[in-house]
Amino acid sequence: MEFKKITLDDRELFLNYYKSNPQYASYKSFANLFIWRNFEDIRYGLVDGHIVITGELTPGNHTYFLLPQTEKAGMQAVTEHLFQEYGKKFRLSCLTKEQKELLEELYPEKFDFSYDRNSDNYYYSTEALATLAGKKLHGKRNHINKFKSLYQWEYIHLDHEAAMECVDIAKDWCKQKNCEKDAVLRNEVKGCIEALNHMEELNLKGGAIRVDGTIVAFSLGERLNEETALIHIEKANTDYQGAYTIINNEFVKNEWADTKYINREEDMGIEGLRKAKLSYRPEFLLEMFHAKPL
């Protein structure tokens, strides 16, 4: 099976496929695959017209495959091909519960499945994030009110010029986090800068908060499927109280009001990140499973 490196020229192929095969997990978003392609050596191949993605979970660790979210016949064709090509050596990553159950039906007792809480995607109600209504989100409203009382601010839609300002913010964030000593953080910033540089080609929307003319927070996202927006990146200067809370709220209100859900990706098992994502009261978690042949 031939796999090729993902380039911007492949975007139309993915978009056309995803129109008839909607995806729900953040990992299969073309923008995500593109900006992480070098860190995980992400490539793709075609089986009977279905897109199969492969990469390395961590350099020198193990190769994984992402199956497309598609109908039963397509899933079977792809899985049969992987069995034929790789025998029992291949691993499937980030399967949705629906995919897991379909594989169990197609191949009883042929896979060992494991649940991966760290990879679950957080799904929120768009309305809930936009309004922050109710007692459970009272604290978020307080953060925003505090921000508004302290600063002269405005929300802006990111154009190319503003996006280049955000590149500097990302670089400063990298220095603050000392990310040169952390490969994941270092590549996160590289991916962030690449997304900012290719917003138009990746069809990303961006928004930012200015205080006294200076951008202090920004966010980038895209439409994942007909009813869901996917938030890829959110960065803020924590010297400004409530900066993360207000960019979260304003970005949803201004850019994604026509969606039902907001997918804010996974927490990677990072305690602080998990606490922050749970504090926004997700509507549900899109559970993720891994599988390997028995």
Image (spheres, grey):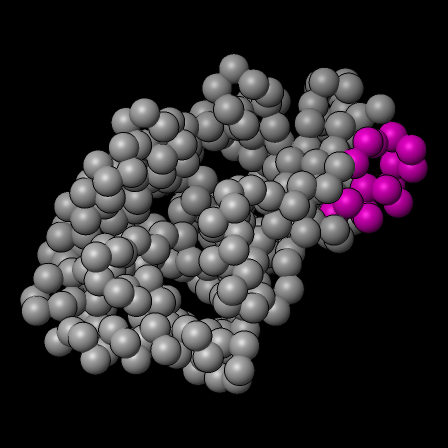
| Magenta span includes 104 | yes
- Residue 293 on image: x %, y %: 80, 26
Residue 48: image quadrant is top right
Judging depth in this view, the residue of 202 and 220 nearest the camera is 220
The residue that appears at 87% across and 30% down in the rendered structure is 110
The x and y percentages for residue 63 are 59, 22
Residue at left 21%, top 80%?
Answer: 149
Name the quadrant of the N terminus.
top right
Residue at image point 37% right, 78% down: 142
Q: Which quadrant would the C terminus be assigned to in this image?
A: top right
> Left or right: 258 with respect to 179?
right
Q: From the viewer's perspective, tell me whether residue 254 is left or right of residue 30.
A: left
* Residue 139, quarter of the rendered image: bottom left
Q: Residue at x 38, y 58 (%)?
A: 221
Left/right placement of residue 4 relative to residue 254 reads right
Q: Compare residues 19 and 246 and report the one nearer the observer.
A: 246
Q: Is residue 227 above or below residue 173?
A: below
- Asked if one can make out residue 38 in the rendered structure from this viewpoint, the answer is no
The image position of residue 246, as x and y in percent, is: 31, 70
Q: Which residues are magenta?
A: 99-113
100 vs 205: above or below: above
